[in-house]
Image (spheres, helix red, strand yellow):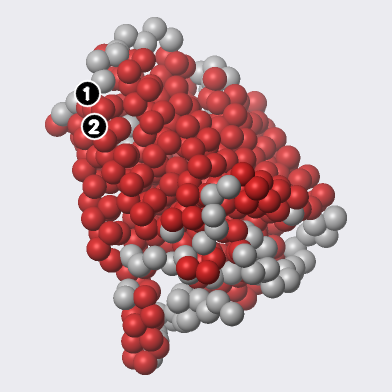
Amino acid sequence: MFRSPFPCLLDPRKIVVTQAAVEEIKTAHGLYFFEFVAIIAGLMAVNALGTDMMLPALPRIGSDLHVATANHQQWVISIYLGAFGVAQLFYGPLADRFGRRPVMLFSLALYAATSFLAAFASSFEMLLVARGLQGGAAASCRVLTISIIRDCYVGRRMASVSSLAFTVFLMVPILAPLLGQITLLVGTWHWIFSFLGIYSLGIAIWTGRRLPETLQPHLRRAISLTSIRRAAWSTFTNRWSIGYTMASGCMYGGLIGFLSSGEQIVRDGFGAPGMFAISFAAAAGTMAVAALTNARIVERCGTRMVSHTALIAMIMVGTVRCAIVLTGHETLLVFVIMQGLTMFCFGFAGPNFGAMAMEEMGHIAGTASACQGFISSMIGSLIGLIIGQSYVQNSFPLALGVTLAAVTALLIILVVERGRLMQPHFPPPAPVA
């Protein structure tokens, strides 16, 4: 029987562990637990930097590359996220066949190359092509980090580990717009893409030197249409897998809507162009608090209790937010507070939805993660694009879009759980591949 190479998880409430346990962890895979979490967070950050760091630069990119319609600047984000979603389908089977390490290292090198291509783009069309390629390369970080964690953990413990990594990772999107703003003070938007290339090369070197292969040899799957079809069918027909993936996509769509239109809302809607980076950091910081809190409570309270409560709370926040906007009482401070509360709820629901979707997919973790990532990314990108392109000088399309997306997610979960919310689920042992 496969034994996790990570036999011990530090209690996130008490960062205390015996020396014997520490040595067991380090001997099993060559890493201390904290370094493992840091590497996972660093890999997750590749995509976060790719989306968030250039948000303050969108107006300057549009001006320099002669983009006539302001809303078209959002394609710099949308093209990236669309390619990010589609490419995940390919990384899963590759990772299940060749292992996590070689696929990850190749994609990080590709990400670096496409980042430098974007840095030297001389037209908006060329930039969009580079961004599409960049998003396709970044997709591996989503698929493979989830696969690596699932190689080692399952259920509530997987959710706890994911939340710890998610907490560290969230420091990046909180700081990324500010870092982008600082970069624009000393250079041009081209420098942002150069930084992304350098960062991806750095994380590739760290990963290559320190992270071991986590896919056990007997779990490797041959690349064949039959194998892929069976794995995809298992992913799509498992009601928890497909249900929580679709619910994740709906919630993710609200987040993408904020990424796409947030800069315009702060700049034009509230007339405060210099406040976006600070506003974004304040709102996104609540997700880090939620993710850290989730890591502390999820093993005790359960993934369903925590995430279902958070989703209902998000709907309530969204309803109040829509009322505030419609009655004309929204200010920049109120916008940041309400967006922060929304992202706080997302920080509780997001990692747990992902863990629940993967509960019964351990034997096909790579392909399942790829299929789930594709579905959630496509749903999220479509919802985010609709929200972003609906921008009309105020935040109502964002508030309404996030609320409707959360309501849709709740309806999906009610179907998946057959009307029973917040009840524990104990998945059967995964079949041997």
Determine if residue 363 is in view: yes
Point out residue 231 in the picture as x, y percentages from the top left corner. Answer: 65, 52
Q: Quadrant of the N terminus?
A: bottom right
**Alpha carbons under labels 1 and 2: distance apart:** 7 Å
Instruction: Kindly identify which residue carries mark 2.
Output: 116
Find residue 39 and report its image quarter: bottom left
Q: Residue at x 59, y 69 (%)?
A: 154
Of the pair 403 and 33, the residue shown nearer to us = 33
Report helix, strand or loop for mark 2.
helix
Residue in the image at 76% along x and 46% along y = 412
Tell me which residue sits at (48%, 46%) in the image: 91
Confirm or deny contact between disc 1 and disc 2 (CB under 8 A): yes
Q: Is residue 276 visible?
A: no
Q: Quadrant of the C terminus?
A: bottom right
**Residue sitting farthest toward the right:** 419
Relative placement, left or right, of 202 versus 277 is: left
Label 1, secondary structure: give it.
loop
The spot of residue 271 in percent (x, y) is 39, 22
